[in-house]
Image (cartoon, helix red, strand yellow):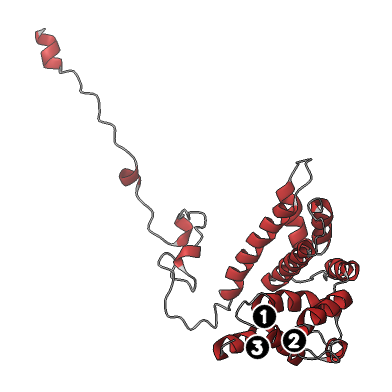
Amino acid sequence: MSKTEEAEFWKKCRLRKMLKEEEAAWRPFHAVFSFLVGRNANLSNVEKMHYLQTNLMGKAAQLISNLPVSEDSSASAWDLLVNRYENKRLLISDQVERLFRIKTFSERLSKEINAILNTTTEVLNALQSLGASIHYWDHLLVHLIAQRLDSSTREAWEVKLGSTTDPPLYQDIRNFLTGRARALESMELGRHNAVACQNKKRCRKSGNKHHTMIHMEGPRHISTPMEGKPTPTTTATQTSVPASPKKSITSSASD
């Protein structure tokens, strides 16, 4: 392994902070170490054993501490770690527990919605990597997530469902929350007090302290004489009807 590869290894793995005493850290360690070291054809078994020993701490390091650094010990050390930490029952249970530990958010903020989406995605990915069957979890996930929403967001979700009697899928509520989060992010980046706004630009339609794109037309105002404006005269507002031409008496007499 070159110095560049080794530096990248330390950066991605952060192995000294992992696998101290927590079984939950085994899966990310397993994935990263297998990719960077275990399946690296440029490393000998001795080098693999060296990286394994020097990048473990706590109980994990003690588990393989008596094994020598040799060509044969690398596979044995890895088997010991797998047998100790690859407890799928506990790993799956830990991930499911993460779902039920998702907190109900009280404020309608984008970070709160994104926290639910991120945690759910991480848990489902972890469960899939463990071989758990999650293909029919839609009803459970939708119910669990909906229960964690604030009252306003929950109401908007129910309004979106409308009168449909078909149960929504997980992807449906995920798409809904993704859209809500994006909308809230736009509002939170642009939210500030108009009175304290230092921007010299004004709305091109009303002249007020807001962007022209969010200008809302109010009802058109009809002026009345009570406002002190000059009242149009009757002759100016009424359309004169031309008088019917009178028949000439002289003409009629001559006829």
Q: 10 Å neighbourhood of mark 3: few (<14), some, or many (≥20)?
A: few
Query: Looking at the picture, how far across and down is residue 12, in whole percent?
Result: 65, 83
Q: Which residue is mark 3?
A: 10
Q: Are marks 2 and 1 in contact (CB under 8 Å)?
A: yes
Residue 32, horizontal then vertical, whole percent? 69, 77
Of residues 12 and 173, the one drawn nearer to the viewer in this rendering: 12
Q: CA separation, marks 2 and 1?
A: 9 Å
Residue 249 occupies which quadrant of the picture? top left
**Crowd rating for badge 1 (residues with CA inside 10 Å; few <14, some 14–19, many 20+):** many
Residue depicted at 48% across the width and 58% down the height = 226
Quadrant in the picture for the N terminus: bottom right
SS class, disc 2: helix
Q: Residue at x 42, y 64 (%)?
A: 205
Kindly identify which residue carries mark 2: 52
Q: Earlier in the sequence, mark 2 or mark 1?
A: 1
Q: Position of residue 190 (x, y in %)?
A: 56, 74
Camera sees residue 25: no
Q: Nearer the viewer, residue 169 or 198?
A: 169
Residue topped by disc 1: 37
First reached walking from the N terminus: tag 1 or tag 3: 3
When the figure is inspected, residue 95 is found, relative to residue 174, above or below; the finding is below
Q: Give the amino acid type for the residue marked by disc 1 in the picture.
A: Val
Mark 3: secondary structure: helix
Q: CA distance from mark 1 to mark 3?
A: 12 Å
Q: Is residue 149 above or below residue 239?
A: below
Nearer to the camera, 84 or 171: 84
> In this image, 227 relative to 139: left or right?
left
Q: Position of residue 74 (x, y in %)?
A: 76, 82
Asked whether the viewer can see residue 64, the reply is yes
The amino acid on which the numbered mark 2 sits, given as a three-letter code, is Leu
Q: Which of the marked residues, 2 or 3, is nearer the chain's N terminus?
A: 3
Query: Residue at (70%, 83%) from the top-left corner?
Result: 45
